[in-house]
Amino acid sequence: MKSSSKIWEHNQIAGEIQNLRASGNKIVFTNGCFDILHAGHVQYLEEASELGDFLIVALNTDESVQRLDKSPARPLQNEYSRCHVMASLGFVGAVVLFNEDTPKEIIEIITPDVLVKGADYEISNIVGADWVLKHGGEVKTIEFLPGFSTSAIEKKIIAAHKL
């Protein structure tokens, strides 16, 4: 399957979800910027995918990344690049962009069976957790692989260029 076919537009999400549910798939959802994909991201996403049959990853648009409390240079890769890199991972079923400050709206459209975030979140603080739980789903957290961070990679690159 071509990675581009795994990148969903908003107008196709409802139909794709209906088909997945009709086939009995357990849908897992997570979200993030995933600006520079590294081993920590890969481990996290692979573990998330193991919680169900079909992993959907919602990526922040470039505009929404810029609104987050990250460096002014972010995103380092544009949304087109980030979508294609993410969609190329075999254990990722679909990728969808969201432009809002949080993925609440897209979570409510998808209503995943399992909502996943990093263990740096308390379940009570995970956007969409109340919706997923109210609709019979689960909310899980996954530990990060120590020593990996896009922000740390960015700082290392900047430091190397100041030599």
Image (cartoon, rainbow, N blue to C red):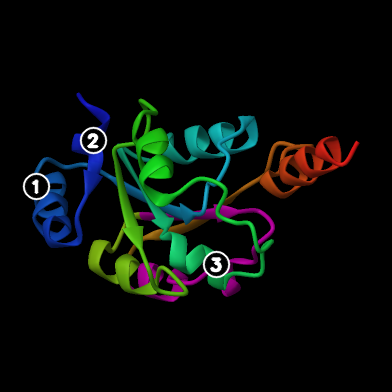
Tell me where residue 124 appears, x and y as whole percent: 58, 73
Residue 160: mark in rendering: none
Q: Which residue is mark 2?
A: 4
Examine the rendering and report whether any part of residue 51 can be seen: no
The magenta span reads 114-134
Q: Name the image quarter holding residue 112.
A: bottom left
Question: Residue flagged by tag 1: what amino acid is it?
Answer: Asn
Query: Marks 2 and 1, Cα distance to the nearest angstrom?
Result: 19 Å
- The image quadrant where one finds the N terminus is top left
Foreground residue among 15 and 23: 15
Tell me where residue 54 appears, x and y as whole percent: 29, 40
Element type at mark 1: helix
Q: Which residue is mark 3?
A: 66
**Viewer-nearest of labels 2 and 3?**
3
Q: Which residue is mark 1?
A: 19
Residue at 79% x, 44% y is: 158
Eyeballing the image, is 20 above or below 122? Answer: above
